[in-house]
Amino acid sequence: QVQLVESGGGLVQAGDSLRLSCAASGRTFSRDVMGWFRQAPGKEREFVAAISWNGGAIFYADSAKGRFTVSRDNAKNTVYLQMNSLKPEDTAVYYCAADASHYVSRRRDEYDYWGQGTQVTVSS
């Protein structure tokens, strides 16, 4: 059974940092593109960051550039999202996703597998 399990979310204050993790199991994800998306209440799920299988290509949403860093450890089948200087507008459920096509994409419909999400709440 393919699973992506996010962890590391929580309640923090503006300016704080969090590191989200996404552990993959059930298949080998080392060749997949891994992405992070988020969904705030009443809004559509939006792209945050994505990383190619070897880290050679990394994309960020404009809202994440300069504050968030995506990375992966293929030996551990885990992808990370380091989030610094958090803002109240970063409050959302954060999802990781895997795209088996190997092309880094910002489109959520390109991703084949999804986790259940982890809540990040940033208070002002």
Image (tube, helix red, strand yellow):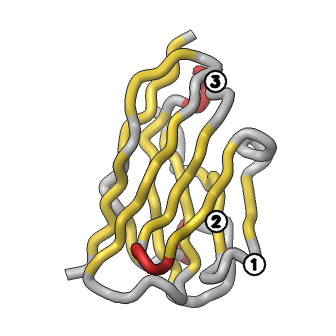
Mark 3 and mark 1: span between their CA atoms?
Answer: 28 Å
Residue linked to disc 2: 50
The secondary element bearing badge 1 is classed as loop
- For marks 3 and 2, the one nearer the N-term is 2
User: At 64% across and 20% down in the image, what residue appears?
Assistant: 15
Q: Quadrant of residue 105?
A: bottom right
Of circles 2 and 1, the one toward us is 1
Mark 3 and mark 2: span between their CA atoms?
Answer: 20 Å
Residue linked to disc 1: 56
Which label is found at residue 94?
A: none
In the orientation shown, which residue stands out farthest toward the front?
75
Residue linked to disc 3: 87
Q: Amino acid at mark 2?
A: Ala
Q: Is residue 68 above or below residue 124?
A: below
- For marks 2 and 1, the one nearer the N-term is 2
- For marks 3 and 1, the one nearer the N-term is 1
Q: Amino acid at mark 1?
A: Gly
Q: Quadrant of residue 119?
A: top left
Q: Amino acid at mark 3?
A: Lys
Q: Is residue 6 above or below residue 2?
A: above
Mark 3 and 2 residues: CB-CB less than 8 Å, in contact? no
| Relative horizontal placement of residue 65, taking residue 41 as reference (left or right) | right
